[in-house]
Image: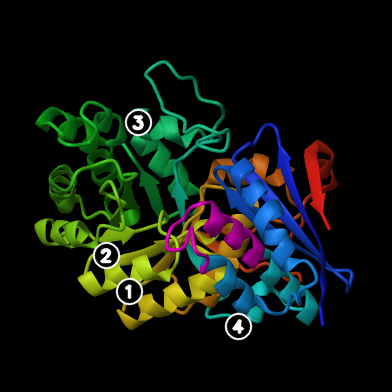
Amino acid sequence: MSRITALRTLRIEDRPNILWLEIDTDEGLTGLGEAFRGAAAVEAQIHDQVAPFLLGRDARDIEPVSRHLLGGYLGFGSSGVETRAASAVDIALWDLAGQRMGVPLAVALGGYSRRSVRAYNTCAGYDYNSRGTRRDISGQDAPLGPYDDQIAFTRAPVELAQSLLDEGFGAMKIWPFDPYAARDGGLTITLEELKRGIEPFEKIRAALGDRMETMCEMHSLWSMPAAARICQALAPLRPFWAEDPIGKMDDAASLAELRRAAPGVPICASETLGGKRPFRDLLVAGATDVVMLDLTWCGGLTEARKIAALAESWSRPVAPHDCTGPVTLVASLHFALHASTAIFQEVVRATLATWYRELVTELPRVAGGMVHAMEGKGLGTTLLPETRKRAAVREAR
């Protein structure tokens, strides 16, 4: 038996959207998990609801724990607080499993399908949404550093794309249409707005030809007709996908209608969904081309494996999300190296180069446009002592 003896949550003031969870066992092992968005609410859920259930249980019982935490009377079938807490627990239990077996987490999951996976850079810059609110760019913002890619894709998209190409990246994700959704809540987009939004894609394609893949992030801001108009305009430029194009990504019927209206643009869906059932509904409806999931929002690695199996049954690839925190990235990489149909691992080069490194001991190596397997047992990373010193620690036993 591997008895759970303690749960600890940690938060730091300057990254209020991130929560870390540590689970101790009587073997002397500590598993690490992470949650993103609404960190205080997730913390309360862990201490008030999850800890009484987990303390004293066998940490090896990952599947029954997952089923219990995701199958409650409230909070199931969404990416709400219950699911985000369950996700953090599940990642920590899998970290423990890998440590107990003495192997990397990808091996504990069932082995490597590949030793490296293709990377794409999300052009979010340094502080897109870890501070508690999402960063919006105005015409007056000064870059925060050489990797402030959120400013660069609006002002110098070709230079940005070339710098990524020079570093080995062959794919990038941008969201130049977002500012125009505020005018009427994304119900419509005008021809002039369409023209301005599409310019970065046109310039990148004209300058770099087929050397750079582009993805269009749409952040669930648009009505179906407006999303269709955007996708139809993008189609001649052959984007790799349009991501989360409509307001609620569990609307399988509207997404399927969008796919029919803009057949030249693959749809990617969706980091915002929790649990396997919404993904099943999208696949049954023919509503998505690429399955994107977020390990900290979907239910963790246990649920992610089931989602990947569904995607494989419909011959759809998967692409783990990361624009959140370092533990999510590490866990997602292990998943992407294990899952047979994974095609990309999302990274944000600005955070990889800066504050991710201030929080954890190890991060994935990105080289030649690929994210490479990590060594070490379990996740292969832990919180730095400096992170613990900056954190307000609450412990439940």
Labels 2 & 3 near each other (Cβ < 8 A): no
Q: Which mark is residue 154?
A: 3
What is the C-alpha distance between the residues marked 2 and 3? Answer: 28 Å
| Residue 166 image offset from top left, x and y in percent | 48, 48
Q: What's the CA distance linking mark 4 and mark 1?
A: 20 Å
| Residue behind mark 2 | 288
**87 drawn magenta:** yes
Give the residue type that dot 2 points to.
Thr
Q: In the image, which disc is placed on residue 316?
A: 1
Q: Which residue is mark 4?
A: 111
Please say whether residue 338 is visible from this viewpoint: yes
In the rendered image, residue 34 lying in the magenta stretch gets the answer no
Residue at the location (57% across, 48% down)? 36
Q: Earlier in the sequence, mark 2 or mark 4?
A: 4
**Is residue 160 toward the left or the right of residue 244 in the image?**
right
**In the image, which residues are magenta?**
71-91
Q: Position of residue 184 (x, y in %)?
A: 20, 29
The mark that comes first in sequence, 1 or 2, is 2
